[in-house]
Image (cartoon, rainbow, N blue to C red):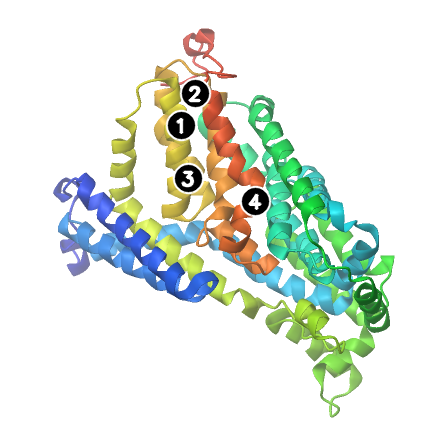
């Protein structure tokens, strides 16, 4: 037996954590995060939240060590948890490159150019929500919508003098509605798989909570648009359009990278290669149609033109693009992107997943969930408890997939025991775990949306109407026992439902 193995306690040596054990790291994290927001406001995710998550993970480790867990065991839990987020981290970095090349290629400026001429300020927020909903429904990816249409819509909003926080809320509302209802979405496939039902029964059952939620959201965005005190900017608008035309020569051909991404996503290609190919399409467009801009971007007359071209594209991918239109507002709007722009976000996700990993491997998270289940007395309390558990899992584990799988796996038997159809569980998982994930700053989804759209999570959170309303609609259905499907007893006898 090796020396490291001799220090590894067996599972029988693990002391069951008390509820106090489990709550200490959670309350410590809440207090530190609250302090971070108080001291650093919207900049808290630039480092303060990361420190809070690491310190909370250390507290959880101390409790785990007290209960008989070795450092090696907890380390493996951290590595496993971070491994779950690896795909998200790769997508984050690739989206950073995509943004850089798409601005350099003129794709984003073209989307802004046409959008400013088409979209009416009075109905802009509503149009944002609807547009993102339709595209997300067709491709099944809220992240792809935010990383393509989203960045352009935020740019249009800023150029038109509208509130970018409300715009981000509208983008996220529409994107998550479409993602949630699309049969091509990963979460829409995952939730019924965990609950034990088929995807189309799941989608049909979701319409009862999802459709009213998006209608309420659209009403809210319409009201905000019609009542907003928008400062007339006709002259500024004309100047901005003229600058975009002069600098990037907008045209339909510059939207090719966008069409490439939408086509690949619609063909169900995984997100990471889709975004990478979209990035390369942007680089090709930049080389073909923005040659002079790329050369000027490099600022190095000693290089041969083709060498400068390669260097400019390379810089846009790893460090983003810096605009030089002569207009400060437009330059700030278009100076974005690059893998380096995602480093802080990746740092946040790594720290969050480390905390979640320790909480799970030491049994602290499971202890909290078990205690919560003791308050379940009937159908309404079971569904409302599921909503709360999934939202809590989003906060603690920082990943929407874990927030779907872990509570779903634990609660599946309870739904069957209470003779409730699996679609009730699958719908509740989506009404909570899926839609609230972008509302948590350190969650992979919240961090992605904030970095991609350039709007802090805490700033767009009050305006993500769909994501905020959906859990309450679901809870009200449970309270009034409306559209709660009973379990088909024949499925138990035939073995279609286990447990």
Going from N to C along the chain, the mark reached first, 1 or 3, is 1
Disc 1 vs disc 2: Cβ atoms closer than 8 Å? yes
Left or right: 64 as drawn, with respect to 319: left
Indicate the quadrant where residue 58 lies.
bottom left
Under circle 4, the secondary element is loop
Left or right: 65 as drawn, with respect to 417: left
Separation (CA) of disc 2 from disc 3: 18 Å
Going from N to C along the chain, the mark reached first, 2 or 3, is 3
Under circle 1, the secondary element is helix
Q: Residue at x 55, y 25 (%)?
A: 202
Residue that label 2 marks: 479
Q: Please identify the quadrant where the C terminus is shown.
A: top left
Under circle 3, the secondary element is helix
Q: Position of residue 53 (x, y in %)?
A: 34, 58
Separation (CA) of disc 4 from disc 1: 21 Å
Q: Please identify the quadrant where the N terminus is shown.
A: bottom left
Mark 4, other Cα within 10 Å: few <14 / some 14–19 / many ≥20: many
User: In the rendering, which numbered label is found on residue 391?
Assistant: 3
Q: Position of residue 112 (x, y in %)?
A: 77, 59
Mark 3, other Cα within 10 Å: few <14 / some 14–19 / many ≥20: many
Separation (CA) of disc 1 from disc 3: 11 Å
């Amino acid at each position: 037996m090796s020396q490291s193995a001799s220090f590894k306690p067996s599972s029988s040596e693990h002391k069951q954590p008390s509820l106090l054990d489990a709550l200490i790291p959670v309350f410590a994290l809440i207090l530190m995060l609250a302090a971070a927001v108080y001291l650093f406001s919207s900049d808290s995710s630039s480092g303060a939240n990361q420190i809070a998550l690491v310190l909370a993970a250390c507290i959880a480790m101390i409790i785990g060590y007290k209960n008989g867990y070795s450092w090696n065991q907890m380390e493996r839990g951290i590595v496993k948890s971070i491994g779950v987020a690896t795909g998200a981290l790769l997508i984050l970095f690739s989206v950073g490159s995509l943004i850089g090349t798409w601005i350099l290629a003129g794709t984003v400026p073209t989307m802004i150019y046409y959008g400013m001429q088409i979209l009416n300020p009075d109905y802009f927020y509503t149009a944002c929500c609807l547009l993102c909903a339709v595209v997300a429904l067709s491709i099944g990816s809220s992240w792809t919508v935010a990383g393509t249409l989203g960045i352009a819509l935020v740019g249009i909003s800023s150029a038109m003098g509208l509130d970018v926080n409300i715009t981000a809320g509208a983008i996220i509302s529409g994107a998550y509605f479409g993602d949630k209802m699309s049969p091509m979405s990963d979460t829409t496939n995952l939730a019924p798989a965990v609950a034990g039902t088929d995807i189309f029964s799941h989608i049909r059952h979701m319409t009862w909570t999802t459709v009213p939620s998006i209608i309420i959201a659209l009403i809210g965005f319409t009201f905000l648009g019609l009542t907003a005190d928008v400062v007339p900017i006709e002259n500024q608008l004309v100047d901005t359009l003229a600058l975009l035309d002069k600098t990037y020569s907008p045209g339909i051909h510059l939207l090719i990278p966008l069409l490439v991404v939408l086509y690949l996503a619609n063909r169900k290609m995984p997100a990471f290669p889709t975004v990478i190919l979209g990035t390369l399409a942007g680089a090709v467009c930049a080389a073909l149609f923005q040659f002079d801009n790329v050369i000027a971007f490099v600022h190095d007359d000693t290089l041969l033109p083709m060498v400068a071209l390669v260097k400019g594209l390379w810089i846009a991918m790893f460090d983003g693009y810096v605009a030089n239109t002569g207009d400060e507002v437009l330059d700030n709007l278009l100076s974005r992107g690059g893998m380096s722009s995602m480093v802080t976000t990746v740092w946040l996700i790594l720290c969050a997943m480390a905390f979640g990993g320790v909480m799970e491997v030491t049994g602290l998270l499971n202890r909290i969930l078990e205690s919560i289940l003791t308050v379940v007395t009937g159908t309404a309390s079971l569904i409302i408890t599921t909503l709360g558990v999934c939202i809590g899992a989003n906060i603690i584990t920082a990943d929407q997939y874990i927030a779907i799988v872990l509570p779903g796996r634990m609660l599946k038997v309870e739904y069957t025991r209470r003779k409730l159809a699996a679609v009730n569980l699958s719908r509740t998982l989506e009404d909570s775990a899926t839609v609230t994930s972008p509302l948590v700053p350190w969650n992979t989804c919240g961090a992605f949306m904030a970095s991609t759209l350039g709007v802090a999570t805490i700033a767009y959170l009050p305006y993500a109407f769909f994501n905020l309303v959906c859990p309450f609609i679901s809870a009200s259905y449970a309270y009034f026992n409306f559209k709660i499907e009973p379990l088909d007893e024949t499925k138990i006898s035939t073995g279609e439902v286990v447990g």
